[in-house]
């Protein structure tokens, strides 16, 4: 059964200088984009009638550029290189063979309101199962839309500046961001940052975190989750088990925290636990090695590939039942040690559900397929993640 035919059937369910801090809802109402975004909505998608290849596709979130066979990984990773801004015929053909679960938009994919709406609509129309459309829109330096010259949207100095004003200001920011993302058909925001900024030498988190105090950060994360929930946009806590105390940048190299599990519980875990209690639908696991917090082979593994950290701690101890997404699998912390296939399979074995931006989609995709077909990874394990992903899409209003 083709993926297009599957969709047609009614199936039984089986930091910027000069920014102002924390504008209020009254002073900066998010615009309502026009024309209105329309999501194709199949009546139902049944896991039981999806082929293995179709199910594996749901596990991947990729850049739009990864769907263009003419764009290599080096060009994709180059922020100054041109990016995909519309769906081509070649991309449509590629998606038929590699029907991914969603895409993540970057600055190079975003030019104007009309272009963005057209790109999102084209992606959804090309995909038989509605896609998750994600973006990093934290407020502050990391805001793909608000920091784009083609948009007039609320802008914020940083999460830390808003967090200093208290949870109500954080909730308002999240509502503002969620409203405008929803208007453009973006269903997933990789925010809020749930890290605690405890290491002044940290090169990557800093003011992206709400606070240097774990309880303050936890209160702000709770407010952010509540704010996004008001808008219907999915939010994602990041970067578990905590990137705020590290001294390295996982974009470039391996990252370590020397804290014990009890020390993590007393600080880093507090905002994640608070966000989970507030109903956060996704948690992003970072490429952070925790040699003093776990034992055995996992002590040498980034959390992304640690069964102990994902399955035993995040799910078992913190009680998270939603979707676990990896941090980008094209970061140096991963690519310096693992092939795309090894990274994809390792993350699934550890308990992750969504595989974010592998450094080679086709290699990662085929490696997961081969692992299941050869019996080293059970199809039941794939089904477990796909079930969560389809439920997530339902929560986002992409499926009935």
Image (cartoon, grey):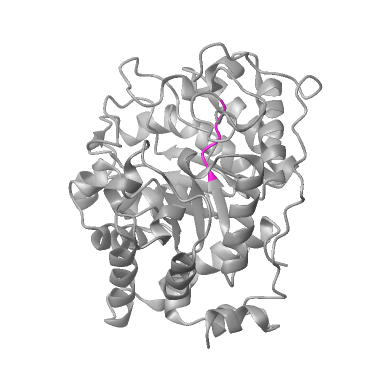
Most foreground residue, 309 or 51: 51
**Extent of the magenta region:** 135-139
Residue 316 in sight in this render: no
Which secondary structure is most common in the magenta stretch? Answer: loop
Residue 347 x/y as whole percent: 33, 57
Residue 229 x/y as whole percent: 70, 43
Q: Residue at x 65, y 25 (%)?
A: 170
Q: Quadrant of the C terminus?
A: bottom right
Residue, far right: 26
Most foreground residue, 212 or 34: 34
Residue 333 in sight in this render: yes
Most foreground residue, 103 or 255: 103
The quarter of the picture where residue 333 lies is: top left
The answer to whether residue 140 is left or right of residue 267 is right
Q: Residue at x 60, y 60 (%)?
A: 122
Q: Which residue is drawn at 58% across and 53% down?
A: 119
Residue, far top: 18
Residue 224 x/y as whole percent: 63, 32
Residue 240 x/y as whole percent: 42, 40
Most foreground residue, 203 or 71: 71
Q: Which residue is drawn at 46% across and 69% down?
A: 95
**Residue 213 on the magenta segment:** no
The answer to whether residue 227 is left or right of residue 112 is right
**In the picture shown, does residue 257 fall above or below 123?**
above
**In the picture shown, does residue 331 fall above or below 395?**
above
């Amino acid at each position: 059964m083709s993926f297009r035919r599957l969709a047609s059937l009614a199936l039984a369910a089986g930091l910027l200088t000069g920014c102002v801090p924390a504008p209020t809802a009254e002073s900066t109402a998010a615009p309502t984009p026009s024309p209105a975004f329309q999501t194709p909505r199949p009546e139902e998608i049944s896991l039981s009638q999806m082929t293995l290849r179709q199910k594996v596709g749901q596990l991947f979130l990729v850049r739009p550029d990864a769907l263009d066979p003419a764009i290599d990984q080096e060009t994709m990773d180059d922020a100054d290189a041109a990016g995909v801004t519309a769906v081509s015929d070649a991309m449509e053909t590629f998606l038929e063979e590699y029907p991914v679960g969603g895409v993540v938009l970057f600055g190079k994919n975003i030019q104007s309101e009309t272009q963005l709406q057209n790109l999102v609509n084209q992606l959804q129309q090309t995909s038989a199962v509605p896609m998750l459309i994600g973006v990093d829109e934290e407020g502050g330096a990391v805001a793909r839309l608000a920091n784009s010259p083609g948009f007039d949207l609320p802008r914020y100095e940083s999460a830390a500046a808003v967090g200093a004003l208290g949870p109500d200001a954080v909730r308002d920011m999240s509502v503002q961001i969620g409203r405008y993302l929803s208007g453009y058909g973006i269903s997933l925001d990789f925010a809020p940052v749930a890290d605690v900024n405890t290491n002044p030498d940290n090169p990557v988190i800093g003011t992206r975190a709400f606070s240097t105090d774990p309880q303050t950060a936890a209160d702000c994360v709770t407010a952010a989750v509540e704010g996004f929930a008001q808008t219907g946009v999915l939010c994602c806590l990041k970067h578990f088990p905590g990137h705020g105390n590290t001294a390295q940048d996982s974009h470039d190299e391996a990252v370590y925290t020397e804290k014990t599990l009890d020390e993590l519980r007393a600080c880093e875990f507090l905002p994640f636990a608070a966000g989970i209690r507030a109903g956060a639908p996704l948690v992003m696991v970072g490429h952070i090695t925790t040699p003093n917090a776990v034992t055995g082979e996992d002590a040498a593994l980034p959390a992304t590939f640690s069964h102990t950290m994902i399955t035993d701690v995040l799910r078992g101890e913190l009680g998270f039942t939603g979707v676990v997404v990896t941090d980008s699998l094209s970061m140096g912390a991963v690519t310096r040690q693992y092939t795309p296939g090894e990274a994809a399979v390792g993350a699934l074995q550890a308990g992750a559900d969504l595989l974010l931006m592998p450094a080679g989609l086709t290699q990662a995709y085929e490696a997961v397929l081969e692992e299941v077909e050869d019996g080293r990874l059970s199809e039941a394990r794939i089904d477990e993640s796909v079930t969560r992903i389809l439920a997530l899409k339902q929560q986002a209003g992409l499926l009935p």
